[in-house]
Amino acid sequence: MTERFVTRGFVGRRAADVGAGTPGDAASRTPPGQYLTTDFPVLSAGPTPRTPLDRWSFYIEGLVREPVSWTWDEFTALPARDWTVDISCVTKWTKLDTR
């Protein structure tokens, strides 16, 4: 098989591949064995399914007091809060200041 089954994100890139503009404290914020990335690697072992937003739904059910579900419009209307965090993935990449 000459084509790779998984996306490039499973292989990773060296730190030298990260573009300019990385914060000066990046080294102290990057865990050992991780490499910095400025994009957001999409890791997938196959095609990404597409769901039309008019058919999208989100359910919480099972061991809950009351099951609940939302349409896309209802879900996006829920209260939200912005967070800025560093994300380190088990596949060895770290993305700093992710909003």
Image: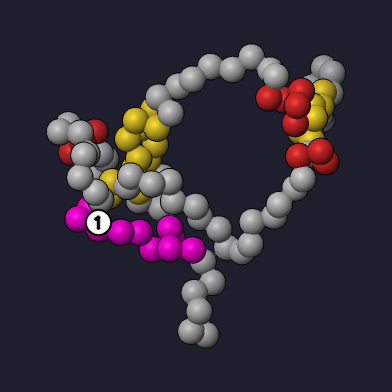
Describe residue 30's horizontal placement relative to residue 54 as left or right: left
Query: Does residue 94 show up?
Result: yes
Query: Does residue 60 show up?
Result: no
* Magenta part of the chain: 7-17
Describe residue 47's horizontal placement relative to residue 25 as left or right: right
Identify residue type, mark 1.
Asp
In this rendered view, identify the residue nearer to me: 21 or 35.
21
Residue at 59% from the left image edge and 17% from the top image edge:
80
Describe residue 90's horizontal placement relative to residue 67 as left or right: left
State which quarter of the image contains the C terminus.
Answer: top left
Residue at 32% from the left image edge and 35% from the top image edge:
96
Hey, which quadrant is residue 31 in on the image?
top left
Residue at 35% from the left image edge and 40% from the top image edge:
95
Hey, which quadrant is residue 52 in on the image?
top right
Residue at numbered disc 1: 17
Describe residue 43's horizontal placement relative to residue 52 as left or right: left
- Residue 98, horizontal then vertical, whole percent: 40, 32
Hey, which quadrant is residue 70 in on the image?
top right
Residue 81 drawn above or below residue 96? above
Residue farthest to the left, as pictured: 24
Residue at 61% from the left image edge and 64% from the top image edge:
46
Examine the structure image and report whether residue 9 is included in the region drawn in magenta.
yes
Q: How is the image coloured?
A: secondary structure
Residue 58 drawn above or below residue 18? above
Q: Secondary structure at mark 1?
A: helix
Q: Residues within 10 Å of mark 1 (few under 14, many from 20)?
A: few
- Residue 66, horizontal then vertical, whole percent: 84, 18
- Residue 17, horizontal then vertical, whole percent: 24, 56
Residue farthest to the bottom, as pictured: 1
Query: Tag count in the figure?
Result: 1
- Residue 16, horizontal then vertical, whole percent: 19, 55
Residue farthest to the top, as pictured: 79
